[in-house]
Amino acid sequence: MILTGGCAVVELVEKSAFVGLVPIKVGSCRIFAAPPETMHLVSPYKGQEKALSEAMKKAHGMAFPAAERATGKEGARCVWFGLDQAMLIGPAPDARLSDFAAVVDQSDGWAVLRLQGPKAEEVLARLVPVDMRAAHFKRGQTARTQLRHLQVSITRIGAMVFQIMVMRSMAKTLVDDLEGAMRLVAAR
């Protein structure tokens, strides 16, 4: 608390939704918080999809993703988020994107976790109604789906690494569900 002119001013500090919850390692898998990054939902205006994609390539080096795909790389990624929507993660959006799309800051609303390890697919198989095996769900693929009863976005970002996004208020539940599945897989 800081006192200014006789008034108390509270200094707010940004914290990850996963503080005190992760990292967790069970067997050959681990979960950990992704580095904090800005997140903006980008929704192209009608008929502006191509122009938006070109503007994104020019400004951020990646196209607007096709359905169920992600573009870019660590630190600058764009993840499909539903019909005519994608989440730009990492860079602050170039102001010119607003000429072609609605761009809305979502940074405080989502929590991003990583699941990594040789049995990560087996862990997800216990929780997700989507086949996450590498033969069916390749690097750069993404799905908006359920993880038990949570609505999540899952993107394969490496051979044995998944990025899982959940509403910030559901962070603890996500960790609990993943840890439980990790324990079941490790016990086999």
Image (spheres, rainbow, N blue to C red):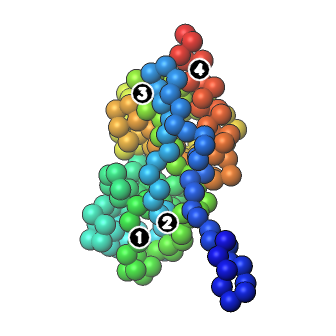
Are the residues flagged by discs 1 and 2 in contact, CB closer than 8 Å?
A: yes
Which label number is shown at residue 183?
Answer: 4
Question: From where the camera sits, is residue 86 visible?
Answer: no
Residue at numbered disc 3:
117
Looking at the rendered structure, the secondary structure element under dot 4 is helix
Asked if residue 106 lies left or right of residue 170, the reply is: left
Sequence-first tag of 4 and 2 = 2
Q: Nearer the viewer, mark 2 or mark 3?
A: 3
Outermost residue to the bottom: 5
Residue at numbered disc 1:
92
- In the displayed structure, would residue 77 be above or below residue 158? below
**Could you tell me which residue is drawn at 56 percent across and 24 percent down?**
182
Are the residues flagged by discs 2 and 3 in contact, CB closer than 8 Å?
A: no
Are the residues flagged by discs 4 and 2 in contact, CB closer than 8 Å?
A: no
Sequence-first tag of 1 and 4 = 1
CA gap between label 2 and label 3 equals 29 Å
Residue 180 position within the rendered picture, expressed as x and y whole percent measured from the top left: 63, 25
CA gap between label 4 and label 2 equals 34 Å
CA gap between label 1 and label 4 equals 38 Å
Looking at the rendered structure, the secondary structure element under dot 3 is loop
Residue type pointed to by label 1: Ala
Residue 127 position within the rendered picture, expressed as x and y whole percent measured from the top left: 61, 29
CA gap between label 3 and label 1 equals 31 Å
Outermost residue to the right: 7
Sequence-first tag of 3 and 1 = 1
Q: Observer-nearest residue: 151 or 168? A: 168
CA gap between label 3 and label 4 equals 13 Å
Sequence-first tag of 1 and 2 = 2
Sequence-first tag of 2 and 3 = 2
**Could you tell me which residue is drawn at 61 percent across and 60 percent down?**
109
Residue 183 position by quadrant:
top right
Structural crowding at the residue carrying mark 1, measured as other residues with C-alpha within 10 Å and reported as few (<14), some (14–19) or many (≥20)? some
